[in-house]
Amino acid sequence: MFNHRCTQMHTDAAKLKFFDPQKSFICVHPCSSVAKFIFRLFLFCLWLSPLAARAGEDQLLFLPPEPAFGQLIGDPREPQDNLIANLSYPRFEGSIGPTLEFLQLRPVDGSRWGWGIMGASFIELDSLGHFVYPERVSDWYLGMYFSQSSGDFSHRFEYTHVSSHLGDELFYSVQRFIYTRESFRWTSSFQPSDLLRLYAGVGYYPHIAPVEKPFFMHVGLELYSNYFDFLFGTSARGCFTYDLKVKDEAGGVTNQNFEWGIQWKWKKESHSAIRIAISYYNGNNEYGQFYQSNDNHWGAGIYFDP
Amino acid sequence: MGPDVQAQEWVFLPPAPLFKTLIGAPREPITGITAYGNQTRYEGAVGATFEFLRYTPSDQTQWGWGVFGDGFILLDEDGATFPMRDGDWHAGMYLSEASGSFSHRLEFLHQSSHLGDSLQGIQVPIFFSRENINFTSSFQPFEELRLYANIGDWENIFPRGEDPFFCSAGTELYSPATDLAGTFLRAYLTADFQWKGEAGGSLNKNFELGFQWKFKKEESRDVRLALVYYNGHSDFGQFYQQPDEHWGIGFYFDP
């Protein structure tokens, strides 16, 4: 099996200008996925200059239009743009979350390697009527990632800072506390077809305040229907997502998020999409200021996927 | 919604908005971080613009319709922690048009401002919530120069009793581009002047001097690094009656 892989990698490697199939180190590193990853990262750094694409060879793109690792649309804490009406309580949630991939390496073997940053802000509002929506809490995320995709598989390694801030509506009823964390997280995704995506990940908080157990795990899936013709010649498809997070914090937490909806695109190969979905969340609250509280609610949301 | 007899075209969810971001206006939907130089404070911004439809009729004008949202956060620094002083949120919808060197944007915008929790028990939050309609015209006769002007009125304004009128004007100046390893790099200078009727009237000035870096000239996505100088009343709603003068270094990402 390993011999076969080695042969295969040589075949691929021979296409790359950077690789010399005669050199022995090439024989070793493809057999280890970790070594391969590190080696690719090294190559990635070497390739910072020149940044321009070269036809017929590896390409290095600066600010590519799409990240190598596709957004996990079912994860409620993935950077995203949305507006969600809470159907169980008179509340609304909003989120703005851009992802900016700085560099993307596209070797001729078809894989993609990305490096970028992401930021996101999540806000929860009460609804008091008469168009008054006081803020309960806001969470802010800022992070950096490396990602890789090849065939049906893609991976992302990220470092993220999170802080959570009590909303001014609750200043007279709730005492805020300092909620700030930094995490490392690895996520792997498998998408064997346009209809199915599975993902799983593990994470660790090297710094966590308030002090809690720092491990968490993450799995989920995305299921899609076939595309169908929608309004005015556009394309749409049904989608269902399930996202599960298991965290060590607060004595052990299991957060589940379900979404049923429709994804609407210009053309089926387009990246940008609008999603309208019904969601159900059960677990501890995702907002840091309430992370020890139970949260169980239905929602209806509109999501803007860049 | 597809191409129609070579005369007009509708595009659903185009990749970039028709009306280009005003990079020198401090409350455009941008993503970035600014470190103040004369105070131990930081500003963060996350912003997104999502254009639903682009219409190109046979007269070669272009029309766009979309939504936008952004969040701005003001942080103090206390060692390794960054207590929050203020968070402002904007969400809105726009119609835009472009033809030749001119482009225009009509916006409806909601803004709310929330006192940061580090000031809990220290300062009393005010109820700050507003909606305005504003119109912006931009003129870009050539690559190195863009001029713009904006006028608007707050239709609903809390705290009550403030003068709802505001207007602004500004410019973007760009140097000739340099080829940096096959990418597009140029220097830029922006000046933005905004007059607000609120709080007795204030003229807010924002200047940026920096670099803009793109993969290719024609792409909208860029990274910017700039020196920033701001003088006027605070742009953060909870402090809108207070003067604010700061300079800083900012790192920005335009979609």
Image: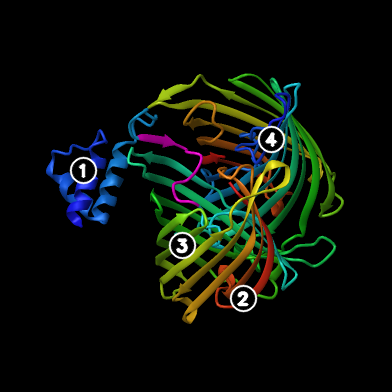
Which residue is found at the position 46% from the left and 62% from the top?
A198
Instruction: Give the label on residue A198, or none.
Output: 3
Question: Taken as a whole, is the magenta stretch helix, strand or loop?
Answer: loop
- Residue B153 spot, x, y in % from top left: 83, 41
Q: Which residue is mark 2?
A: A295
Q: What is the distance, in whole Å, between disc 3 and disc 1 at their CAs?
A: 30 Å
Closer to us: B101 or B223: B101
Is residue A85 rendered to the left or right of residue B185?
Answer: right
Which residue is found at the position 74% from the left and 34% from the top?
B96
Q: Chain of mark 3?
A: A
Q: Quadrant of residue B14?
A: top right
Q: Chain of mark 4?
A: B
Q: Which residues are magenta?
A: A59-70
- Residue B121 spot, x, y in % from top left: 66, 69
Which residue is found at the position 57% from the left and 42% from the top?
A270
Instruction: Give the label on residue B2, or none.
Output: 4
Q: Are marks 4 and 1 on the same chain?
A: no
Which quadrant is the C terminus of chain B positioned in?
top right
- Residue A131 spot, x, y in % from top left: 82, 60
